[in-house]
Image: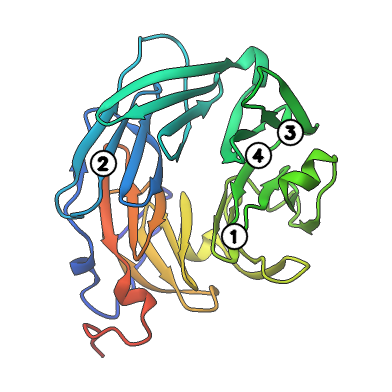
Amino acid sequence: SYWGDPDGEFFIPIARWSTESSARPSRSFSKPAIAIDVAGTRAVVVFGDGEFQIFDLSDPANLVIVAEYRRDRDLARFEGVRIEGSTVAVFGSDGIELVRLDGEDTQRERTWGRDRVGSVVGAEAIDGNWLLGTNRGLLLLESDSDQIRTLIAQPILGMARGSDDRIIFTDGTSLFIASLQTLRSGRVEEKLHLGRGFHPQRVHAGGQTAVVLGARDVAWVDLRSAQPRLISRISGKEAGRIHDASVIGDQLFLIGPRGLQVTDPSGQRVVDSVDVDARRRIEAAGRHLVIIGEKSLQVVDATPFVTPAPASAEP
């Protein structure tokens, strides 16, 4: 599979040194993993039925389960997860559930079904409340009441929280940026048009940049200036099918059927790759990349890629 992808295209992996040494052994699951989130040294992996496992990342070569959430079987499906302090939010087409962590114990606290919040594509905890990106718009779940407030009344396809607590979200055409206070007044601060052809969907935010996943391409956006600026756009024609992307510092990483791919500092072209087992979703954790596949979890040490002159590099 390292020499070809599901689209039937032959490709030659690019590696300037023995990059496979940066990948740690993978950890297997008994059922397909859907999404992952990372906070500090904890990674939470959620499965399609809403159950999840939390792993300690202290030793990337030996990933240990420190907590696990099991729920009664039903027809509900989940596609996303977010961990915030001692709370884990699992969400998807059937709504959102908040689960409280207490050491190894887990307890479901609150649930908002699809009938109340619609299909949820993103969830962020801000100022004690939960902000949801849904097919009904941007919704605010107020912690001191059972009230659901609509801030933006149009379908949201992707959402993330930036380092300055501003919200970055997309409606499938443009990228919007706003603080919670601005959203409460029904306004946004900035807008970057990406186009229906690009079809922006999932959003990742890290540092002063954001990564936007399109139907086939990936856009890397600079958030430092008053007006968001497109840094680069990586085409699926060059990188193959792109399932997810993340950023560490000023380095862009892509994950897909061709494995982990690393771009040059400008984000314009792929210059390195790592053959990994996990190829579905990716999250940055310090100088490590945490990746899930259909039934695997794997950590890659990104240090050699984000330092100017890796000691292990070879001509």
Marks 2/1: CA distance? 26 Å
Amino acid type assigned to the residue bearing label 2 in the image: Phe
Q: Residue furthest bottom?
A: 315
Instruction: Provide residue 281's location: percent of width, then percent of height.
Output: 41, 47
Marks 3/1: CA distance? 20 Å
- Whether residue 238 sits left or right of residue 145 in the image: it is left
Note whether 272 is above or below 187 in the view shown. Answer: below
Note whether 242 is above or below 233 in the view shown. Answer: above
Mark sitting earlier along the chain (3/1): 3
- Whether residue 75 sits left or right of residue 300 in the image: it is right
Mark 4 near mark 2, Cβ–Cβ under 8 Å? no
Helix, strand or loop status at disc 1: strand
Q: Residue at x 29, y 80 (%)?
A: 16
Q: Nearer the viewer, mark 2 or mark 1?
A: 2
Q: Quadrant of the C terminus?
A: bottom left
Mark sitting earlier along the chain (2/3): 2
Mark sitting earlier along the chain (4/2): 2
Q: Which mark is residue 55?
A: 2
Marks 1/4: CA distance? 15 Å
Q: Residue at x 73, y 50 (%)?
A: 179
Instruction: Provide residue 31's location: percent of width, then percent of height.
Output: 27, 28
Amino acid type assigned to the residue bearing label 3 in the image: Pro
Marks 3/4: CA distance? 7 Å
